[in-house]
Image (cartoon, rainbow, N blue to C red):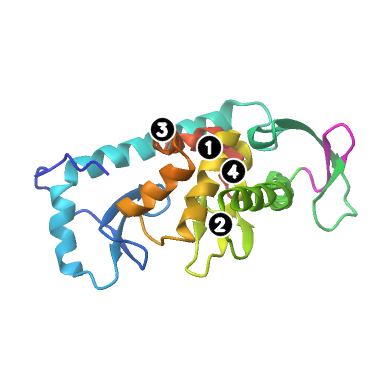
Amino acid sequence: MGDGDRGGRVGAPLGFVVRVSPRARRVRLVVTLSDGLVVVVPRGFNQREIPGMIEAKRAWIERATTRVAVRAAERRERLATEPWADRPERLALQCLGAEWGVEYFSSPSVAKTTIRERPGRLLIVRGDVDDAGACRAALRRWLGRKARTTIAARLKVLAYEHGFEAGSISVRAQRTRWASCSRRGAISLNAKLLFLPPDLVDYVLLHELCHTVRMDHSAAFWALLKEHDPECRSKRRLLKEAHQHVPPWFDTSS
């Protein structure tokens, strides 16, 4: 979070959103493209302290905001310049070490754009294929189904191998979180994990499995994660840049 920044310059007040988290042990600042500056606070935290904390972190916040804006611009540029970037001709899923070709066939009689998987790792998209948004939505649905049958299965294997007990498992397409774990041990996975290298996917899964034991990010939690994933520190750093593996069309509004 840039803990080394203290005493930034005073300027116009910075806008922010507050989120109260039962898992938080301390205040965290997060900058995202969709929500801007998000202040995550523990339950019972005195929110009147937030403006002063934000001012003390102003320099870090401005750098983080610039980084987010630059990455968003780069993704828009990729989307505008890559051939068929809005309707991909292939899907390379690093997590599975496999690639699928994608072909589009117009079928005006089909009410909803759908996908069928063919032998030889080929996906056939049928429907109103001139509607790029409908094609992307169909591909996201297919990726969700693929994640439920592969990444969810991997989570169960890791839970068994490392002695964890996970609750229900679901797959969604979150914009920011790779995964999450509820207090009841229910784990939600992001379909985008399919685009990540297998070692980073395992890191995310073990991270959430450790939350079934410790619902915080205390020193004890990180010690538990390191016990099960000795390379967790380096993987955590790599995960911060992992969105570069996700194709721009996945997050493009339909």
Res. 193 mark: 4
Residue 187 spot, x, y in % from top left: 56, 60
The kind of residue on which mark 2 rests is Phe
The kind of residue on which mark 4 rests is Leu
Res. 164 mark: 2
In the visual, does 67 lie left or right of 12?
right
* Residue bearing the label numbered 1: 200
Q: Is residue 97 visible?
A: yes
Res. 225 mark: none
Q: Residues within 10 Å of mark 3 (few under 14, many from 20)?
A: few
Determine the image quadrant of residue 93: top right
Q: Residues within 10 Å of mark 2 (few under 14, many from 20)?
A: some
Are dots 4 and 3 in contact, CB under 8 Å? no
Q: Earlier in the sequence, mark 1 or mark 4?
A: 4
Q: Earlier in the sequence, mark 4 or mark 3?
A: 4
User: 17 or 199, which is in the foreground?
Assistant: 199
Are dots 2 and 1 in contact, CB under 8 Å? no
The kind of residue on which mark 1 rests is Leu
Callout 3: SS: helix
User: Residue at the spot x=52%, y=70% of the render?
Assistant: 184
Q: Earlier in the sequence, mark 2 or mark 4?
A: 2
In this view, the residue farthest toward the bottom is 44
Mark closer to the observer (3, 2)? 2
Cα gap from disc 1 to disc 3, whole angstroms = 10 Å
Please state the total of marks drawn on the protein image.
4
* Residue bearing the label numbered 3: 234
User: 232 or 163, which is in the foreground?
Assistant: 163
Cα gap from disc 2 to disc 4, whole angstroms = 21 Å
Does residue 102 show up magenta in the picture?
no
Q: Earlier in the sequence, mark 2 or mark 1?
A: 2
Mark closer to the observer (1, 4)? 1
